[in-house]
Structures are given as C-alpha cells and as structure tokens.
Amino acid sequence: MTALHFATLAPFIIALIIPLLYRYMPKIHTGWFALLLPLILFVYFLSFLPTTMAGDVIVQSFAWVPSLDIHFTLYIDGLSLLFALLITGIGTLVMLYSIFYLSKVKEKLNQFYVYVMLFIGAMLGVVLSDNLIVLYVFWEVTSISSALLISYWYTRPKSVYGALKSMYITVFGGLCMLAGIAMLYVMTGSFSVRDIIATINPASALFWPALLFILLGAFTKSAQFPFHIWLPDAMEAPTPVSAYLHSATMVKAGIYLIARLTPVFGGDALWFWLITTVGVVTLVWGSLNAVRQKDLKAILAYSTISQLGMVVSLLGVGSIAYYINDGDNVLYTAAILAAVFHLINHATFKGSLFMTAGVVDHATGTRDIRKLGGLMTLMPMTATISLIGLASMAGLPPFNGFLSKELFFFSMLNMTELTMFNIGAWSILFAVLIWLASICTFLYCAITFFKTFTGKFNAAKLAVKNVREVQFGMLLSPLILAVLVIVIGLFPNVLAYTLIEPAMRAILPGILAPGEQFDVHIYHWHGFDLEVLMTIGVIVIGTLLFLTMKKWSKLKLYNSERELFNMPYDRGYDRLIKGSQSLTRLQMTGRLRDYVLYMCTFIVLLIGYTLLRYDAFAVNTSNVSPIDGFMWLFAIMLLLCVIAIPFIHHRLTAIIVIGAIGFLVALMFVVFRAPDLALTQLLVESVSIILLLLAFYHLPELRKEKVKRSFKLTNLLISAAVGVMVTLVSLSAFALGSESGLTSISAFFIENARSLAGGYNIVNVILVDFRGLDTMLEILVLGIAAIGVVSLIKLRLKGSEDV
Amino acid sequence: MKRMKPHDRPNDMMLQVSMRAIAVIIFSFSVYLLIAGHNNPGGGFIGGLMTACAVLVLFLVFGMKRMAKVARLHFTTLIGIGLLVAVSAGVLSMLYGYPFLTHVISALPFDIGVYLVVVGAALTIILSIAEDDA
C-alpha cells in the first residue's frame, strides 16, 4: 500500500472520523474539518504535475484479490491527474461553500459530510484506477453516494424519487458496463486498461457488444440522451451537492470512461457514430429544454446535460484521429483538445453558477425566475459573479467559454471535410444542429441573467422579508471560480502544456512519435472565418429571440416544464411495481402453511425426478459405522417427540417438545464427537425457545381446526413424501460417495489447519480463516436480518397490508 | 391469559439473587469460549450466543424497565461496531501488503467482530419482539 493508495482511500478513513467530530465538537461546523481533506489531496496531486508534463506515467499496484486477477492498480497520467485535480480542487471550494450554505444547527451535518467523503474517495478511485473491476466498484459507490446525497432531505418525497431514479438509471448503466468489462476480459485476458489497449482485437466478435455495453454505462452516468432524465430530478439535492456532483465531477465520470477507452475502441465506425450522434442530440435536446425551465437549478441542470453532450460529441469526433493516423489528423486531435479544454471550463463556470443559484435561493427563499427580479442592486456581487459565469456559458468573449465554443465549432466544421464513415451530408446537419443549440444556450443564459437580476424587484412574491447580499464566505467559492473563468479566458495557454496536452496524450496514445508533442495553442482571434460568423449569428439571433420573448412565452410549449421522456420511465416504473405485486399476490397467500407446502412439493418433485432420471438410487451397507444401543434409544425418543407434535393442543407444550427435539439432536452431536456443533445447537435451541415463547405469548391457544379430509390427506402425503425423499437421498449419497472414490475435503482441512492457520479447532479455523469471507458476508446478512425484524415490528402493519 | 407482573409473584427474590451470580458465570464462560475458540471448541458464534443468553436471562428475571435503566447499550449499534471490527481486521492485513482478510498473527479480532454482531443481532431481534406489546 503506497502513499498513492492511501491518498485514494483517505476519504473513506476520514468518513469514519466525521461522525465523531460532529458529535464531540458541535460548536465548529464540521465542514471546516471536511475541507481539509480535499485541500491536502489537491496539493498532493499538484506535486505530480511535473511528471505528467514530462510525459511520464506513475503506476502503483497492490494485489487485492490476486486469484481473480483484480489488482488495485493506480495510474497517474495526464487524464487521470486532470480529473483528480478537478475532483479535489472543486471539492475544496464546494466544502467551503457548504460551510456557509448548510446551517450547523438545523442540518444533520455528520451524514452529509460522510456521504461527500465517500463520494470523493470513490470518484478518485474511478479516475485513478487502472483495473476495470476496481473502477467498476468505485463507479457504483459514486452512484450510491450520489443517491444518498440527493435524498439528504429524505422526508421530502421528491428527494427520494429523484434519488431512486438516479440510482436505477446509473446502476443499470453500471451493470451494463460490467458486462462490457467482462467481454473485454474475455477478448484480452486482462482487466488492466493498459494491457487491453495493447492487445485488443477490433475484429473480434465481442468487440461491438463490449462497445455498446460500456457506452451504455458511460451514457447513463453522464446523463446523455435518453438517459438524461435523472439529472433534473437530482436537483432536489442541496446546492453544494448539485454544484459538485451533478455538474463538475460525477457526471463527468462517463466522459472519463469514454476518454480512457478511446484508444481501445477509437477508429471504429460504430464508436464514432454512436458517440457523436448521441452527443449532438443531447446537446440540442438539453438546450431546448433548458429554455422552458423556470427553476434556476433546473435551467442549470438541462444546461449541464447539453454541455456534457457537447464534450461527448467532441470525443466522438476526436476518435477519428485513430482512423486516419497520419500527419493530417491535427484537425481531429483539435477535437480532443476542445473536449479537454471544455471539461475544465465547464467545471469553472457551471460550478460558480450553481453556487450563485444557491446564494439567490438562500437570500430570497425561491429559485423561480417568475418570482425573482431586480436583484442586481440588492446583491451586486452575486450578480457580477453570475454575469461572468453566464456570459462564459453563452460563449461571449473574452471568457473561457468563448474559446471552448470556437474550438467546438472548429472541430465540428472539420467534419464536413471528412469522407470516411459515410458522413456526407450528416456533417452539415450536425453543424446546423449545434448552431441551433448554441442559440438556445445564449437564450437561456440571457433569460437567467435578466430575469433574475434585472427588471422589477417584487418583494411580495418572495418568502424572505429582508433580501440582501449574503455573507462573503458564501460568495468566496463562486468568486474564485469566476476569477478562474476570466483568467483562463485571458491566458488560456497557461493550461496548454500543463494540463491539456498531457491529457490529450493520455487519451490518444500511439498517435505521436516519441518526443513529439501535440501542438496546443489557444487564442481568441482566428480571423473572420466561419466560426466567428457562427458566433455572431448566435448572438444576433439569440438577442432577437430574447427581446421577442413576451410573444412566444405565451406558447403552451414554453409553459410546461416536464419533458416527455420522463413518461416512459414513470409509466414503466409504475407498471413494473404493479406487475410484480400482482405476480407476488398469486403465490404469496399470507399463510406460512402454503409457503411450506409449495417448497416441500417442489423439493419432492425435483429430487424424485433426479433420482428417476439419472438412476441415482443406491444402497450400500458395507461401510457403515457401528451403532450402539443408546443411539437407538435417542433415535426412538427423537421420533416419538416428532410424531407427538401434531397431536398437542397446548401451545406451550408444543414449544417445549420442539425444544426437546433440538436438545436431542445436540445429544446426537455429542455422541458423534462434534463438540462445536453440539454447543452451537444447544445455544441456538435455547435462544430459539426463548424467542418462540416471547413471540407466541400474544397468540391464542391452538385450536382444533375443521378442515376437509382431502386437505389433511394432501398434507400427510406431502410430508411423507419429503421424508422418503430425504432418506433416499442420504442413502444414495452415502452409497455413491464411497463408490466414486472422491476424497472428502475434510482430509485437506485436517492436514492444514495447524500449519496454515495455526489452530487445532478445525471447525473454527474453517469459519474464521479458510472461509473467512463467507463468514464476513454471513454476519452482514445477520445484521441486515436484525434490522429487517426491527423495521417490521416498528412499522406495525395490520394483517393484510403490503410492506 | 395475562401474565402477572414480576413484582407480583412472591418467589421472585430467590430467582433474582441467584441470577446475579449465574449471569456472571454464563457471561465469563461465553467470553472464554470466544477467546479459546481457535484451539478448543468455541469461537465467535458460540460465544456470542451464550452472551446473548446471559443477557436475555437477566432481562427475563429482572424485567424490561429495570434492565433499561442499567443496560444503556443500544444493541443495534453493536451490530455496526461488530461489522466494522470484522472488516477492519481484514483491511489491517492489506496495510501490510497482504491480500484482504489474511490474518495477522491471530484471527481473534475477526472473531471478536463476529461475536459482537451475533450478540447485537440476537438481542436486537429478541428484544424488539419482547418489547412489542401490541
């Protein structure tokens, strides 16, 4: 375990400490402690910058489950370092923001920061890990922690709905991704990304299925069309969470996956078409829907969807560089440059926008743009920071958003010169679509700014009486991000060879000759080419649309907010629940007797069929151990007790007789010289009897029920059949086992218990050492069962209610 | 058929006095079973069940209200602590560079984790059912 491993796992360790800090130091906002972790990690990861700038990589490995080829390998190159810096850097700023946003009196801070720590650790694991299975584990932990954070205010039904929706969609994608990873393993024999890049065979039959499944995972996580429906509902989370997870980091995990696996799948036509098309469609659909929204965070959510679509489509175009792979592909590597650059820019301006939306929410009590207005004079700093972020998002110079957008137009227009992949007229269509989407982007940015900060201030519509600028601490984080927006806009080439070029090299290995570098030069003025004309067109038409807003805002299309793609999800979800309920109601009659009947019948049929079909019945009495007289006595007593039970009327007596049976079995264990089993049986029996006594205290006496003869006969038949089957199986198992010559595993354990595990008690050694993992999962199940029992009792359901 | 309250029954005094001693014996034997598990019959599961028995017997004899005043432990938390201890025992070996769940010197920490979970789970289940008076 190296320092790098510790750095990745540190958030999980801190997550253990936070509840203690919260409980024992309530005067200090827990956020101050939580802030330290991402800050320290940010500085730690900065120390790797010189290495990646020089083009080297760092690999640290640790054998986690060596038998399954799962190694905890951490891999730092340009791409993973970029993401790690984003995660920890934005994490620090969000922690700082959350200190002022979440009240330490009213909120359960310990839960919040534990979940955030879990998220940070998991996200770092996703971007740093080289082994795909480890990546998958961390991927799912991000889904889980995201769902926990979305449902942070779990008493609100909308929060729970949003959290469940996000979890269903992203976990579904995660499982598909796991299938894709398994296929990659079958094709290449390794889980390591570097090995897979080296040995992948694009002509293999599993190539396209693996591609599809992995893309499903990436698209669901990054909210691409049509899986984007979870992101607007995820806005129920507290604003720090929205700023962190759902704009800057978690949703970019899918993009990271696509970028990381571009060397594996890039150059393939399906990869190009799927990613570019989905990206462009997402871009357009997101920006169209963002115009319709009235809630500030909803606008930002749809805008995030659309901007992520932009980055995804750029990665698709950039993958062409693998197809061409000669000197001419500098046109297409520009797409990767644009993608990486926009990743950074989007994190800065979107993060600051979410935070200012939260500030407005905090100060006025609402996020509805129909109620807000005229806040510029009351909250000048917030207005300025918002303006910077929105102008950058709309693509206005001199901000970094303008530079990204120009690069985006440049890359997409380059596609029109392509002849492969049958692109043809599609490239022109794409160009037109992205131009339209940019108009919408400009429009919703304008709407957001002007409706919130200019216009008339209407105090009557707001819940908060005294609206004024919030404390400086809350504005510090968005201010830092806004400053970054300006600085990157004015001096973009500071990032060029420090962050962008190493990332490009990581996404497109094998394109450059050794010693070469990508040429990264970003500047504002390229001359009066098509891109500038497109931008001017966007600004002109966008302004026109904004000015004529009164006319078209009466349209019904504008007035509704919920998009129609939610319908398949909601309807499908309802039908799934109702369908499974009716299916369950068919078999679950509510009576324990029926369930036992089903189980016993099934066992009888299955065993009977197997015995008959495979002629598996055999009796061999030659190697039987001798039975003493008192063993016969115990066996007969056992039989008598069992037979007596159906004839007992008094419930207490029945319980005691059951206990007697248990103790007799324990006695048998003693006779067969198994002290561990005997002790366990004795104790379990005692505890069970106490439990039965407590449970049955409330039930009435056993009554003789009037049931039909046929009913009694059926029960008798089935119980007799079960007894006969079990006897036949035991006899056959013994007979066939001694004939087949297989040695029992107990020989291995007897030999090795002392030498390998250091203990003489073989049973315990098996439980704790040889099969320790099983035991750990068993106690986990035990804990879950206990919690289930408590929940059932506390719920106090009536007789026929459904849980 | 309503059971009489414990303090109504006349012969409880003997039971309570003797149970104080007996519970200590059962409890210490259960801890012995836990620790001696690796070389002699015993182990986490058995020790846990026996401790649960000891506590249960005390609950039965002294009644819910009196025990609630004395035993402030939240048994559900015990499950979580036990799981944490068991997993940490596995993770501890990772810090030394071995794969997960290789026991360093002794398997006792893991067994203690198992013990705590069993005690917590058994008592949680039984006491929830017992306290439910509806």
Image (cartoon, coloured by chain):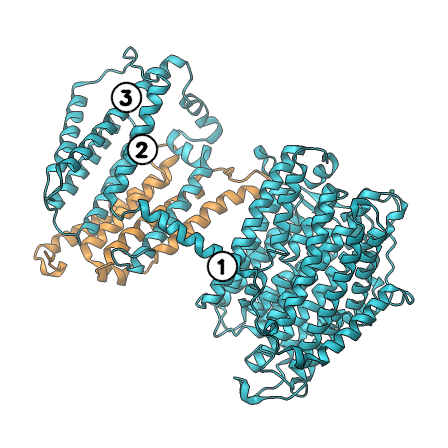
* Residue A355 in view in this figure: yes
Badges 1 and 2: C-beta atoms under 8 Å apart?
A: no
Whether A671 is drawn above or below A488: the answer is: above
**The one of A62 and A578 positioned closer to us in this rendering:** A578
The residue wearing badge 3 is A728
Residue that lies at the very extreme toward the left in this rendered image = B10
Q: What element carries label 2?
A: helix
Amino acid type at circle 3 is Leu
**The one of A418 and B51 positioned closer to us in this rendering:** A418
Residue that lies at the very extreme toward the top in this rendered image = A622
The residue wearing badge 1 is A570
Where does residue A740 sit, x and y in percent of width and height? 40, 14
Amino acid type at circle 2 is Phe
Give a yes or no on whether discs 1 and 2 share a subunit: yes
Whether A241 is drawn above or below A461: the answer is: above
| Chain on which label 2 sits | A
| Chain on which label 1 sits | A
Identify the residue shown where x is 48% and y is 58%: A571
Identify the residue shown where x is 32% and y is 18%: A732
Q: Residue A602 carries which label?
A: 2
Number of dots carrying numbers: 3
Q: Which of marks 3 and 1 is nearer the N terminus?
A: 1
Kindly indicate which chain is depicted in orange in the rendered structure: B
Amino acid type at circle 1 is Asp
- Which quarter shows the C terminus of chain A? bottom left
Kindly indicate which chain is depicted in cyan in the rendered structure: A
